[in-house]
Image: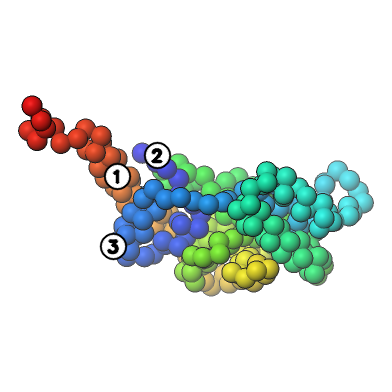
């Protein structure tokens, strides 16, 4: 069964929680709600924020200026005030972090991680970040102002990143893994969490947990669909008017 895809943040924040907790959280996720805004405008231009280098050009390219980055992100927001308020601080913070740390980025084509029930996940930007000291990392942006990754959530995200980026790619065995937490402040400053190999969950552990989460999710979706069908059909002839 293939169902509505859960977000990466929800998958890892639900990891290793009791069944009752997962059920309550997934029931809340399923309930219709007004969602204001999206980080998609920033995601489209995150390469510009971290000084992407093009592989066929021998000389290093200049970093995108903050003004140019802001213009690109603002254009993607199409004048929507909620989108602008969400995405511009994130873009500025990322640009500032990359400049301060002298980061340059390179695209890396690594296959998505396919989790139970056929859903594809990235767990990290499709870029590798190179620091001046030679350290190269893959980074997972934790963007939400509220409900950020928990401690177990970070460990789970890094475990998924390890499987996607390193386990099946010998050339990337020395790759570092980071989570960039965008703080819930006006400037959305970045706090970096490094990966400790001793904290990683095994592949079997994280796959079994995701399978359980999706099995509960399927039950929640089926129950909600059944309830909606009952509302549409009405009370039926036994309770209807003649």
183 on left or right of 237: right
Tell me if I can see residue 12 in this picture: yes
Tell me if mark 1 has few (under 14), some (14-19) or many (20+) residues whose alpha carbon lies within 10 angstroms of its own: some
Q: Residue at x 81, y 65 (%)?
A: 99
Nearer the observer: mark 3 or 2; the answer is 3
- Residue of label 2: 2
Name the residue at the front extreme.
242
- The residue wearing badge 3 is 20
Quick one: label 3, few (<14), some, or many (20+) residues within 10 Å? Answer: few
Q: Secondary structure at mark 3?
A: helix
Residue 200 lies left or right of residue 59; in this view the side is left
Q: Which residue is mark 1?
A: 224
Which residue is located at x 29 percent, y 44 percent?
A: 224
- Disc 3 versus disc 2: distance between alpha carbons? 23 Å
Considering only vertical position in the picture, is 45 above or below 98?
Answer: above
Q: What is the residue that sits farthest to the right in this orientation?
A: 59
Quadrant location, the C terminus: top left
Name the image quarter holding residue 17. Answer: bottom left
């Amino acid at each position: 069964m293939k169902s509505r895809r859960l977000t990466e943040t929800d998958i890892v924040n639900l990891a290793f929680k009791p069944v009752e907790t997962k059920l309550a959280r997934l029931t809340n996720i399923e309930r219709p709600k007004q969602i204001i805004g999206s980080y998609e405008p920033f995601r489209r231009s995150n390469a510009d924020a971290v000084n992407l280098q093009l592989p066929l050009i021998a000389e290093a390219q200049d970093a995108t200026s903050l003004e140019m980055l802001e213009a690109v992100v603002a254009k993607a927001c199409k004048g929507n005030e909620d989108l602008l308020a969400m995405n511009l601080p994130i873009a500025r913070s990322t640009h500032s972090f990359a400049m301060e740390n002298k980061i340059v980025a390179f695209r890396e084509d690594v296959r998505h991680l396919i989790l139970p029930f056929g859903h594809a996940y990235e767990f990290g930007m499709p870029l590798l970040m190179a620091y001046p000291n030679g350290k190269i990392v893959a980074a997972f942006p934790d963007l939400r102002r509220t409900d950020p990754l928990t401690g177990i959530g970070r460990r789970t995200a890094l475990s998924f990143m390890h499987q996607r980026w390193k386990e099946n790619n010998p050339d990337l065995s020395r790759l570092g893994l980071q989570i960039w937490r965008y703080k819930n402040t006006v400037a959305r400053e970045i706090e970096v969490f490094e990966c400790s190999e001793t904290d990683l969950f095994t592949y079997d552990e994280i796959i079994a947990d995701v399978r359980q989460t999706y099995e509960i999710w399927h039950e929640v979706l089926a129950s909600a669909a059944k309830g909606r069908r009952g509302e549409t059909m009405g009370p039926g002839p036994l309770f209807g008017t003649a």
